Each structure stands twice: as structure tokens, then as C-alpha cells.
Image (cartoon, rainbow, N blue to C red):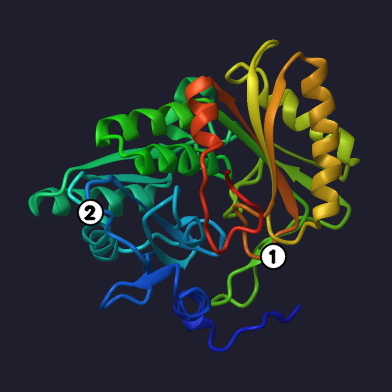
Amino acid sequence: MAMRKIINDPSSVEDETVAGILAAFPGHLKTIEGSTRALVRADAPCAGKVGIATGGGSGHLPLFLGYVGKGLATGCCVGNVFSSPSSEDMLDVTKAVDGGAGVLYLYGNYSGDTMNFDMASEMAEMEGITVKTTLGRDDVTSAPNTEMERRRGVGGIFFGFKIAGAAAEEGRDLDAVHTVAEKAVFNTRSMGVALSGTTIPAAGQPGFEVKEGEMELGMGIHGEPGVEVGPLLTADEIAGQMLDRILPDLPYSSGDTVAVLVNSLGATAPEELYILYNKASLILGDRGIKVHRAFIGEYATSMEMSGASISLCKLDDEMVKLLDAPASSPLLSQQVGG
């Protein structure tokens, strides 16, 4: 099947996406001179506050570009679709968001990203900027929980942005922001289900496919293999299977308080997400787990992939306060705080 996308030149999708975002929200965001793949908060750098820098491959909006905003990330750069941004762009972002209190790198655990971010961190340190790193690694199907260092970062990284961003906005120092970001990441678990593949514009054809009438549990946001391929189940059955893997992984237990994220992977309608959440909330209630807050919508997509993910973040009193702190980003479809 021929690719059907509303684009111009497939090779310019990434640059034109960033240009369109900057054109739409000039009062909120600004570019970095010399880069077509980076943007920062309009008020960056924020003097005396920790800067939070992120990035990753294009194709996942509102992740990563959409998380730049007050109480979230301070700046971001992206690479080609599903490919890492360059270390040079990341260094430019680092310098643009440094307000003198250091910079936290917060991004997903993928080999290309870690290599380029590590290079940018080394160059930033040479220029006198202190950098600490937190990696999103919430995907329970990507490695056993005894090998957390191998796990991928997916939609649950939202909680890292929200909680670390609030801590930075409060004026906490770099060590404190890093500590709470690590706590958020450690307490977050996610799992996805895919009903279709996706097409990278430059390739012009699907990079992976899910057969008609089937679904793939645990497929990654770049088409990484899942843990089970089978017939398409009902929403209640899908929610049950996902939580059966998520809940014992931390584990989440009776008496815990959590935040829940039900995320569309790109082509899944809001109605379907709320049906998933309805069953998930019943399961959590039956387990004695209290839902403090639910976030439903598009938070980390994979182009036009049909599917969804569920993320849980176990909260303590400090994390509840930070999660509920005001935050804003012009790209996020749902209010993220306040």
C-alpha cells in the first residue's frame, strides 16, 4: 500500500515539524540559533534553576518536543524519525537551558540516545556545566526487572518529566532534582499493545506490521518485538493482561497510591482509552490500590500506530505534591498539573 501522509518532502518532515511548532507557539517556545531540530522554553535559561534537557527520535509527539514547558522540560532536540539527535544539538540545548544550577538529562534508555547524550554531557562538563542523567526505563516487557539497565523507556517517562520538572521549578538543586527524577523512574512501570505497524516517511513503507485481527503485547514504540502475538482481545481482557504483568513487577500492593497513564500510540481513539482505563481502575480498586490521578490521551506516540500503553507510578507524599504542581506545555492535549 502506498504511503498516505500529509507531508511535503519526506526528508524534511523533522525540520518542518519543529518549524511548525515554533510558528504555532511563539510566546511559549523559541529556537536555538543554528539548529533546526531544537527548541527551548521562551524564558530559558531560568537563572538559578536547574535546566532539564531531553531528546530522542522524531515520530513520538508530544514526546519529546511537547514536554518543553513550565514545570516540565526546559529544552529539547530531536533526530530523524526513530533516530537519536546529534550530540552537537544536545550540547546546544544544554548550553541554552543552563541557568547556572546545572542540567538534568532525562530521556529514554536507547543505545543511540545514551551514546550521543553521554558525548554531549562530556562536552558540557568541559565548558563548566554540571550534568546529571536519569534514564526512562519503564517498559516491563523489554527485560527482566533484575536487569533494569536494559529496559526501554516508553510512555511512563511522563511521570519523570512532571515530577522532576516541578522540583526544578521549586528551585531545588541539581542533586535533589536528580534524586526525585530517579525515584519517579524507579517507581514507574509500563506496558503497551500494538494493533498495527507504522510507516517512517523517509522509507515510504511500513517498518513493521501486525496482521489483521491480531495484536502484539509488549511491542516497543519503534516496533521492537513484543512478548506475545495473538488474536485481538476485548479492552477488558487487554487491560487485565497488561496489569497482570505490570503489578507484580515493582510490585504494586494493597495500600499503595498510584498515578495512572493510559496513552494512545497514535491512532487509537479517546473512547478506547477510557474503556481501557475503566477496567484498569476496577482492577486496581479490587487490589486495594488507590488512584490519585489519571492521565488519558496522547503522551508518547509512534506515528500512526494503533494501540495503547498503560503506565503506573507509585507515589509517596513528596511525589503527590510534585505531580500536582502547576505545569503547562502548548503541545499536550490534557492539562498536566494544577
Residue positioned 87% across, 33% down in the render: 237
Seen at 47% across and 26% down, the residue is: 186
- Indicate whether 10 appears above or below 226: below
From the viewer's perspective, tell me whether residue 315 is left or right of residue 107: right
Q: Nearer the viewer, residue 98 or 338?
A: 338
On the rendered structure, is 251 left or right of 103? right
Under circle 1, the secondary element is: loop
- Label 2 neighbourhood size at 10 Å, few (<14), some (14-19), many (20+)? many
Is residue 194 at least partly visible in the picture? Answer: yes
Relative image position of residue 314 (x, y in whole percent): 58, 24
Secondary structure beneath label 2 = loop
| Vertical side of 254 occupied by 234: above or below | below
Give the amino acid at mark 2.
Answer: Asp
- Discs 1/2, front: 2
Residue 17 location in percent, x, y? Answer: 51, 76
Quadrant where the C terminus sits is top right
| Mark linked to residue 304 | 1
Q: How far separated are the C-alphas under marks 1 and 2?
A: 35 Å
Between disc 1 and disc 2, whose residue precedes?
A: 2
The percent position of residue 124, horizontal first and vertical second, equals 16, 53
Q: Amino acid at mark 1?
A: Glu
Q: What residue occupies the far top of the structure in this picture?
A: 254
Residue 145 spot, x, y in % from top left = 52, 22
In the picture of the structure, the residue carrying the numbered disc 2 is: 98
Q: Residue at x 86, y 43 (%)?
A: 275
Is residue 138 in view? no
Badge number at residue 233: none
In the rendered image, the quadrant that contains the N terminus is bottom right
Q: Are the two marked residues, 1 and 2, in contact with CB atoms closer than 8 angstroms?
A: no
Within 10 angstroms of label 1, few (less than 14), some, or many (20 or more) residues?
some
Query: Which residue is located at x 65 percent, y 58 percent?
Result: 333
